[in-house]
Image: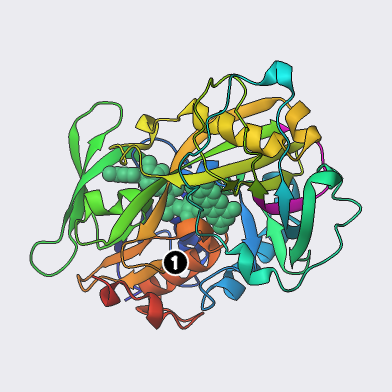
Amino acid sequence: MASEPRNIVIIGGGIIGCTSAYFLTRHPAFNPSLHSITILEATSIASGASGKAGGLLALWAYPACIVPLSYRLHAELAKEHDGAKRWGYRAVHCGSIDAKGKKPSDGENGGEAVEGGEEWKKLPKTNIKQGETIGAEIPAELDWFDRSSIRSYTEMGTPNTTAQVHPFLFTTSMAELAQAAGAKIVFGSVTEIDYTGHGVKGVVYTDKETKEAKRLDATDVILAAGPWSRSIFPDAPIDALRAHSVVIEADVSPYAVFTEIELPKDFAVPGQGKKRRHGKSVNPEMYARPDGTVYACGEGDERIPLPTASDLVVCDESSCDDMHAYISSISPTLKAGKVLAKQACYLPLVSTGGGPIIGDTGIKGLILASGHTCWGIQNSCATGKLVSEFVFEGAAKSADIESLDPRNVM
Ligand SMILES: Cc1cc2nc3c(=O)[nH]c(=O)nc-3n(C[C@H](O)[C@H](O)[C@H](O)COP(=O)(O)OP(=O)(O)OC[C@H]3O[C@@H](n4cnc5c(N)ncnc54)[C@H](O)[C@@H]3O)c2cc1C
């Protein structure tokens, strides 16, 4: 199998497509004179969630069948390629705080607050309630919060179990390292996978520059288009959920912080007049980064369905402003920090729950690697390694991932 010529086409240049390309070039059976590897990306590398995620890595993430492998591979890659410098890899503390927010001062209040508002739709990364029995002292170095607002602190992870990367830098580095080892990157939007007859034969795409329809012959296709997977292959049971995030200038101690913030009754977001979007409590997540910034992400929302391409994703600035106001209500440091980016992206979710799904689709040569939910950065390395094993060895070898078999849910 590995000694025959292969044209391997990866659809999607997000973190899953790029780690797949990287690990395919590192597989012992890869022979650049026999095997071609092409990433076909519609917009630009890491233009979706992979460039706008938080980048938290955790041994306490899910699913358990790939988390330890992926966590270890992240550490190994960082060691091999100086990930600390190249993509901001480092170990961090992680905790959750239960806090009562403070009102913006009178001069800042945009208007009279109106009670009510929708309930905050939490991203499915973790359930804070799960850890609440542990309890802990608020660490002294977690000094970027107003202590008088914090009701309790729960340790969720230590630097032995929790780390981080800058997802855009990690994804683009994976693409560059794969390219240096022989993979190609082609910019075009896949419109069809040709699997007529006995398995995969090729893909049809619209060239990004010329807008012409083109075809790439393929013996193997890896569908790694994240939330767009279903639009390319309708049998892929993948849904999409939008989420907003902000990047704030603030040089603070290395913590990832989950929150439960109770908003004061008459809380109004500065500059937003009388409407109050949210109800009683909100749950933004904040991750300090080594580049002197803090990344914060908000709730999931279904107000705008997935657009056809990553460059058409709409960012609702007021959602970002809400989030900054909520964070500011418990952190004077983040309140003072300049907001450097306001952005939105879509999370890939498996329609039946759980996720990701990785492996054979039942169509010869078509492998699906998608639905990574809130843990796609953490689980990217294991996914890439397992994809390389499916391609060159016909099965997953490094982990038992029967529970992630796409055929279970297709
Ligand atoms: C707010 C937020 C915070 C997050 N934080 C974390 C975190 O801290 N830790 C963690 O582990 N995970 C996190 N995640 C999850 C993680 O970002 C995703 O699981 C992961 O990025 C999914 O990667 P992907 O490659 O499958 O999809 P994507 O990044 O969406 O990439 C898919 C790619 O496919 C391309 N594409 C689409 N259609 C086509 C087509 N027709 N032809 C060719 N290419 C196409 C797109 O342009 C895109 O580049 C977070 C997600 C969100 C939304």
User: Residue at position x 48%, y 42% from top?
Assistant: 46
Q: Give the x, y percent position of residue 229.
A: 30, 53
Q: Is residue 263 above or below residue 93?
A: above
On whether ligand 1 comes within 8 Å of the CB at mark 1, the answer is no
Residue nearest the observer in this picture, 8 or 134: 134
Query: Relative to 134, is 117 on the left or the right?
Result: left
Query: Relative to 244, is 77 on the left or the right?
Result: right
Q: Which residue is mark 1?
A: 30
Placement of the N terminus among the 4 image quadrants: bottom left
Q: Give the x, y percent position of residue 24.
A: 45, 63
User: Residue at position x 27%, y 40% from top?
Assistant: 189
- Amino acid type, residue under disc 1 in the picture: Phe
Answer few, some or many: residues within 10 Å of disc 1's Cα (few below 14, many 20 plus, some between 14 and 19): many
Q: Is residue 178 visible?
A: no
For the record, the magenta segment spans: 249-260
Q: Residue 257: within the magenta? A: yes
Query: Relative to 343, is 354 on the left or the right?
Result: left
Q: Is residue 369 above or below residue 310?
A: below
